[in-house]
Image (tube, rainbow, N blue to C red):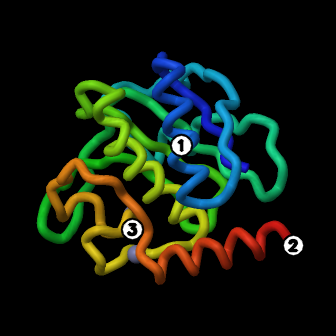
Amino acid sequence: MIRLVTLDAYDPKVIDRLCKVLYTAFGVGCEHAGDMSLPAGQHEPFDAQELLKALPSPRAYADDKILYLTSRKLKPRSVISGEVPCSGFANQNGPRALVSSAGVKDPEAGLKQIARHAMHQLGHTWELHHCLDPRCAMYPPWTLPYDGGDTFFDTFCRDKSEQRIRLAKS
Ligand SMILES: [Zn+2]
Ligand SMILES: [Zn+2]
């Protein structure tokens, strides 16, 4: 089960559609677990890793994944080539992922973009690594201008995530 925790106010329709996209992408149920306030002592733009660390976990089962969604800005991340925009964070094989919808002007129209970020970060929680297929959700998010199309996992990433999800359930 993917449990979506909102840190800011969202249109329930957007949350509903996001859950459907994630269900289709992973074959795992997704539900809105509720709202949570941002932790005190941190300020926008947030350091994605620090923010995720400071967020309390709602009650969850062992194989649940928790996806936190915020509309606040995240600090750019340093890579070899300089600084790149940061759309979220997740620990590889961890139970939790954070995604920001900042920069997505209209969340309803930008849903595909939020879904792409969410698929990417949740992918990491199921041990997916970055992928060389530019159409795949696991392609490094900062290297390609988003074209507005639907995001999916290529065969390699889909097979791997299905395998991980099956293993977690058994
Ligand atoms: Zn990544
Ligand atoms: Zn892939």
Disc 2 from disc 1: Cα separation: 27 Å
Residue labelled with disc 3: 138
Disc 3 from disc 2: Cα separation: 25 Å
Q: Position of residue 111 (x, y in %)?
A: 37, 37
> Considering the numbered disc 2 on the image, is that residue within a helix, a strand or a loop?
loop
Q: Which of the two labelled residues, at mark 1 and mark 3, occupies the earlier sequence position?
A: 1
Residue labelled with disc 2: 170
Q: Residue at x 50, y 35 (%)?
A: 17
Give the amino acid type for the residue marked by disc 2 in the picture: Ser
- As drawn, 101 above or below 147: above
Residue labelled with disc 1: 52
Give the amino acid type for the residue marked by disc 3 in the picture: Met
Q: Nearer the viewer, residue 155 or 82?
A: 155
Left or right: 143, with 62 as reference point: left
> Considering the numbered disc 3 on the image, is that residue within a helix, a strand or a loop?
loop
Q: Residue at x 70, y 48 (%)?
A: 29
Please tell me how crowded label 2 is: few (under 14), some (14-19), or many (20+) other residues with Cα within 10 Å.
few
Q: Residue at x 35, y 44 (%)?
A: 112
Q: Label 3 CB, ligand 2: below 8 Å? A: yes
Q: Nearer the viewer, residue 169 or 71?
A: 169
Disc 1 from disc 3: Cα separation: 20 Å
- As drawn, 162 above or below 41: below
Q: Position of residue 167 (x, y in %)?
A: 77, 76
